[in-house]
Amino acid sequence: MRTSFPAIKTLGRPRAARGRVRDMTTTVDRGAPGLLAPPAPVRISLTPKTTLVGQLDGAWWPHSRGLEAELPPLVDALAEPWGRITRVTVNPTRWPVIPHKVPVTGHTVHVGWFTEQDPDKMILLSYSVGRWDLLVIPPETEPAAAARLMSASTIPGSILTAEGLLAADAVIGGAVAARSREDAWEAEGGAGMSPPGRPMGQRISTAHTDSAR
C-alpha cells in the first residue's frame, strides 16, 4: 500500500533519464571463485524512467558504513542503468572514514564530502550522463522498514527528501510496532483480562443494580 503524497513539484535541476526499478537483491560478482567469500547482494531500488523529477532517484541499503567496501559493488550494479559513475559525495556524519578515491571495475571513483548535504543521501555523478540522488538507508534498519523506504523512494515526482522519508517512516514504524504489541496482547488472552489499572476480579458496575429494584 502506497501513501498519498502532496502535489508534485518539478525541480529546476535537470537530470538524466532514469533506469528501471531494480531488484533489491542485485548481486555483482567481484571475487575470484574459490578465493573470496560470495559478495553480499547490492540492495538498491531505482525510480522508473519518467518525465517527473523528484527529490530522489531511488534508495540504497548498504551492509555497512565502509565506503571502500560498499562503493565498488554499488557502482558496478549501476553501470547498466546509469552509466559510468565517476564521482560521489556524502555527508561525513554517517561515514566514519571517507577515502579520496575508491577503485572500482575499470576505473576509479572520486569521493567528496559536504557537511551541508543531507546526511542520509548520496549524490552520484557521471561526466557524460548526469546526476542521481540516492536515499541511503541505515545498514541496521529492520527489513520491513527498509522495504517501505525502498518503495517510497521510487515514487516518481515525490518531493520528500531523504531526511523527510526517514522521519515519516519512523512514525509509521512506531504505529506498526504499537499495533503488533496490541495484537500480541490479545492473542495471549489480554482481551479477557482486566484493563490496566483495574484490579483483577473487580466487577464493572452497571446502570441497573438489584438495590435499585
Image (cartoon, helix red, strand yellow):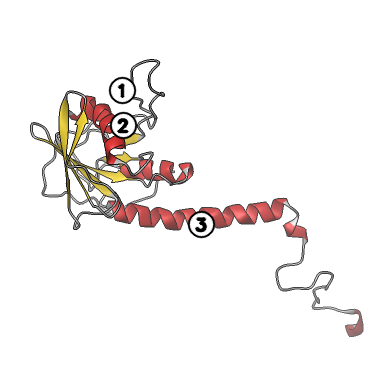
Measured along the vertical axis of the image, is residue 155 above or below residue 165?
A: above
Q: Which residue type carries mark 1?
A: Arg
Q: Residue at x 28, y 28 (%)?
A: 77
Q: Name the foreground residue: 160 vs 92.
A: 92
> Looking at the picture, how far across and down is residue 211, in whole percent?
91, 84
User: Marks 3 and 1: which is nearer the front?
Assistant: 1
> Looking at the picture, how far across and down is residue 32, in whole percent?
33, 17
Report helix, strand or loop for mark 3: helix
Q: Report the Cα–Cα distance between label 2 and label 1.
A: 22 Å
Q: Report the Cα–Cα distance between label 2 and label 3.
A: 28 Å
- Quarter of the view holding residue 6: bottom left
Q: Name the foreground residue: 46 vs 62.
A: 62
Measured along the vertical axis of the image, is residue 107 above or below residue 7?
A: above
Q: Which residue type carries mark 3?
A: Ala
Asked if one can make out residue 20 in the rendered structure from this viewpoint, the answer is no
Q: Is residue 115 left or right of residue 179?
A: left
Report helix, strand or loop for mark 2: loop
Of pointers 2 and 1, the one earlier in the residue sequence: 2
Of pointers 3 and 1, the one earlier in the residue sequence: 1
* Extreme residue in the left direction: 128
Q: Is residue 192 left or right of residue 68?
A: right
Task: Name the residue beneath numbered marker 3.
Answer: 175
Task: Name the residue beneath numbered marker 2.
Answer: 21
- Quarter of the view holding residue 25: top left
Report helix, strand or loop for mark 1: loop
Q: Residue at x 11, y 43 (%)?
A: 14
Q: Report the Cα–Cα distance between label 3 and label 1.
A: 40 Å
Task: Name the residue beneath numbered marker 1.
Answer: 30
Q: Residue at x 51, y 57 (%)?
A: 175
